[in-house]
Image (cartoon, coloured by chain):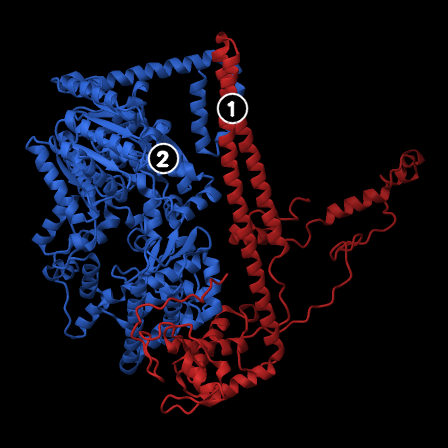
Amino acid sequence: MKFFIDDLPVLFPYPRIYPEQYAYMCDLKKALDVGGHCVLEMPSGTGKTVSLLSLIVAYQQHKPEHRKLIYCSRTMSEIEKALAELKELMKFRSQQLGYTEDFRALGLTSRKNLCLNPSVKREKSGAVVDARCRSLTAGFVKEKKERGEDVELCIYHENLDLLEPHNLVPPGVFTLDGLLKYGEEHKQCPYFSARRMMPFCNVIIYSYHYLLDPKIAERVSKEFSKDSIIVFDEAHNIDNVCIESLSIDITEDSLRKATRGANNLERKITDMKSSDAEKLQNEYTKLVEGLREAEQSREEEQFISNPVLPDDLLKEAVPGNIRRAEHFVGFLKRFIEYLKTRMKVTHTISETPPSFLTHVKDLTYIERKPLRFCAERLTSLVRTLELINIEDYQPLQEVATFATLVATYDKGFQLILEPFESEAATVPNPILHFTCLDAAIAIRPVFDRFRSVIITSGTLSPLEMYPKMLGFNAVLQESYSMTLARRSFLPMIVTRGSDQAQISSSFQIRNDPGVVRNYGNIVLDFSRVTPDGVVVFFPSYLYMESIISMWQGMGILDSIWNYKLILVETPDAQESSLALETYRTACCNGRGAILFCVARGKVSEGIDFDHHYGRAVLCIGVPFQYTESRILKARLEFLRENYRIRENDFLSFDAMRHAAQCLGRVLRGKDDYGVMVLADRRFQKKRTQLPKWISQAMLDSETNLSTDMAVSTAKNFLRTMAQPFKTRDQEGISTWSLEDLERHREKQMLEDERVRREAVANGHAMDGITHGGAVTAADEFDDEIDEDLMMLDAQ
Amino acid sequence: MAPPRASMAHRGDEDEVCPVCKSSRYLNPDMEFLINPECYHKMCESCVDRIFSSGPANCPVAGCHKTLRKNRFRKQTFEDINVEREVDIRRRVMQILNRREEEFDSKRAYDDFLEQREEIIANLVYGTDVAKTEANLQQYASSNVRSIRANQALEEKEATYFQEQQTQEQELARMRRQAAKMEYENERREVLAGREDVLTRLASGRPADAAAIARQGQKVLLKKSSARRSEEERIRQKQAALRNSDAKKSGQPAARAAGQDDGGFIKGLKRIKTPEPEKPYDPFGGLVPGKRDYFTQSESYPSSYLEPIRQNAQIQAGGFDLREYYSRTLLEAFAGLGCFIDEEVSERDSAAPLSVGQPVSTTGQS
């Protein structure tokens, strides 16, 4: 259907629209007009992606400046889904408009997923594919070929050079699959086609990392213009992604491999000195002059790029003591040896980068500045040496990246050296964690560079946490509730067992037989009353294992077995996917099954249990993080000192966002229904931290239930849900046709008019105040909106 | 702060054998290996005791004829013996060639120096041109004793300063941590106390007041928490201010005079400048107050119009002085001579972004 938001014509590819979708689009448009970042929370399964895409595409096509859309999602399947959605949308648009717009949209994923070369495609690991691909496509390989040497080239990549550089693929939307097919037909490399076509695309869909990880972002996302629209979908974990992209773990094994890499480099240098000394000399003179190899670093097949963010990059020459290749290799070796000596301690050490640097200097006379240039110098050396089997140098690269990071950032990072894997271990297996504590570091350039960044997900509550943690000002923060024609999900908090004893997964009582039995009874009762699939989430693998074995001893598992098939998620991905498959089969053939999984595991994120795959979800205990971890402790302290977020606030926020994710798994649309049970005494207080759409649906009477009450409520609910329900009943309430939409707009317009009139009538007394407000608001968008809201409240 | 290094764990090297006495770790788990920086040959502690206790002796390793002393034996820091040796050499060279970046004309010169130093170290490590390099080094050391000392002192000062700052920071962090904990505790206690208070009042009060009491309790709690927040904020600000002032007080150690003649060994060093003696203070900054560029004012100018005024005591009685009038008129007449507006305008336009804010001084006077 087609409708207008203000003066913007929006083509929506479905005949019906949900009210919250409409509200979402209106707010989105407002945010785009104003320019600024926003945080939007929209219930899962209400068509977030399609509303986002249809609004932004409409916006792009309507406005003369054609702002580019960069849509970031988490997993490959989500990217593919979004692309398919976009394709449908564009088809609909061209049908409606009667002509095809000049529009390009591409998705980008790793080489492993996009490679067509039969010999490279065979490889299993992504790193190997990358390295093999580079060895076939790098610039110097081609030069060699032209010189007549016998080297192998990738024919798919070579064919790209025969095409027009700005028209490698025809206009239109290509899903990843479609791109692969097109590449196969025309014998051209899909990966490089996508990479090179990026500047010409209207919409780009790829994973977070291409924008957040400075190692990749520098290469892939450097050229986007300032007015691009950035969308982070499923962004509830965005702070962790930011942190991971700047954190490095170094083990003894990787150091050993790095030493080997350094020795190889040394050998290569001596070889080259005897055969082709001129090249090394060239590199040397370039470094002396302080020339950045501007044109070369643009090449796509760069080995490793600087992990430091663009605004921190030094515009200086490489320091003199690592200018010569042999000096640099000696330097690397010394640094690796130093790290090895650090690994030999027997107790945990936690220190800041400055103190680490002083110690390095005391022991090995390595100063800060050359360390800072480590990554860049290594890149330059590798390029000069024309190394082909780059995957061997991966650990060395890691060490160089670490060196650069540790010498660049004083604040927001911590070095933690743990000699033992766990408390009980006696065999040392030291790991040097270099952890980023500040999520804002990685994402700051994105906020600084682009005018509109939109962060959206199904579960972002409490909304004000994200701007705080990521260090930005949001012009708009909104949480949408879900309009429902009938109450299609039943969230409940169970605080007591049937014996009225309180249940909780808190550390003191989690192994009490009474608590364990009560938890077992909840699972048992729900497996009895719920049809089809039941999903149970535990806070951790450790707890899950212990509680399951205790249930086994109590005979609870045997009783559950009478009603449902029991399946368990394990840390092993293959085993888990097998369990999941069996679970689905069991649900499909009507017997039903129960899946035990972990709130921070693979299942809790990204796997949907729609319809009969999940009729009830149970969250056993509050999924807190493991608070004894050093890394978490350091981060909590950092958050407290710098962002004034208290430890408990953060822990509880983090636990609740995972719990909300788990609950959201069962409800994937408006015709879906399910029971959501939060089984812990402590949830009662944390109710406010649930997303608005869940907490609104929760009745006060259902926040403090015992097991038997919860079960009878659930039984009633499921019985109601089993009544036939026609889609017609939803119309006008939870789905709008065009007429409903028009009616709503009219109503709103009248409302606005009334408000305005009242404001005028309220008169001049308010005038002075508004005036003052407007003056201060002029320099801060944020305030303006607040001011408006306040005005509305006042009336 | 250097973490203790003493507690090195021995692992994965059960079959390690002392190259001198051939005893292995399997038999002697406490075996420690020592090296001597003369030749870097590794041997176990008991061998060192056995061979060198009675004074200097030759290295027991076949083919090595170095004479070693017991007191120079030490534990190995790095696993790789080459790195160990390189670091020893580096230590020595760095102590001599310890020029600092401030002492050089340009970054480029400093980088060249760094490379040169690296070259020297490499020469010593790989044994190329040892004699010549050593000679150079010795010569430099003897002719630059003072600057070497000064730089060493400086480095030490920086190190201690850094150390101090670190401990201070740690102390502050610890205090902050404690404060946060206390604050949390207090808050919890207050909430509990408040609840209790409300309960007792509810118990003693009349049933009609119940709602009012509960509401009041809620309000008190809220007020308290907001008051605490603002208090907290103030303390925090104070702390921040304190930290800043600290940082300023003990700022960077002052720069000092650079070294003396180094015999041309290191290039690109800054010339030492003696500061010029200060000139006497001139309040007008070079301007002479009464001076006029284009004219000298005389006592009177003939004018039939002004003459009566001169004579008229009535006018002059009020303090009117014709000289003031002359001076002003002449100044106005000559104002703007010697400034060429066209030129200045074109100049300003060409350098537009820089001189936008500066008014053109002479145009306003005519």
In screen coordinates, is A29 left or right of B246?
A: left
Q: Amino acid at mark 2?
A: Cys
**Residue B272 seen anywhere in this rendered image of the structure:** yes
Residue A730 position within the rendered picture, expressed as x and y whole percent measured from the top left: 18, 18
Up-down: is B34 above or below A240?
A: below
Q: Chain of mark 1?
A: B
Looking at the rendered image, the quarter that the C terminus of chain B falls into is: top right
Residues at marks 2 and 1 on the same chain: no
Residue A22 position within the rendered picture, expressed as x and y whole percent measured from the top left: 26, 25
- Which residue is under mark 1? B194
**Residue A473 seen anywhere in this rendered image of the structure:** no
- The residue shown at (44%, 87%) is B51
Give the quadrant of residue A589.
top left
Q: Chain of mark 2?
A: A
Kindly give the residue lying farthest to the left in the view shown.
A589
Foreground residue among A343 and A756: A343
| Colour-to-chain, red | B
Q: Amino acid at mark 1?
A: Gly
- The residue shown at (14%, 74%) is A150
Asked if the residues shown at circle 2 and circle 1 are in contact, with their CB atoms under 8 angstroms apart, the answer is: no
Residue B308 position within the rendered picture, expressed as x and y whole percent measured from the top left: 89, 38
Give the quadrant of residue A275.
bottom left
Residue B325 position within the rendered picture, expressed as x and y whole percent measured from the top left: 82, 42
| Colour-to-chain, blue | A
In screen coordinates, is A638 left or right of B228?
A: left
- Which residue is under mark 2? A38
Up-down: is A676 above or below A174?
A: above
In screen coordinates, is A658 left or right of B103?
A: left
Foreground residue among A43 and A40: A43
Give the spatial CA distance, label 2 vs label 1: 39 Å
Foreground residue among A673 and A9: A673
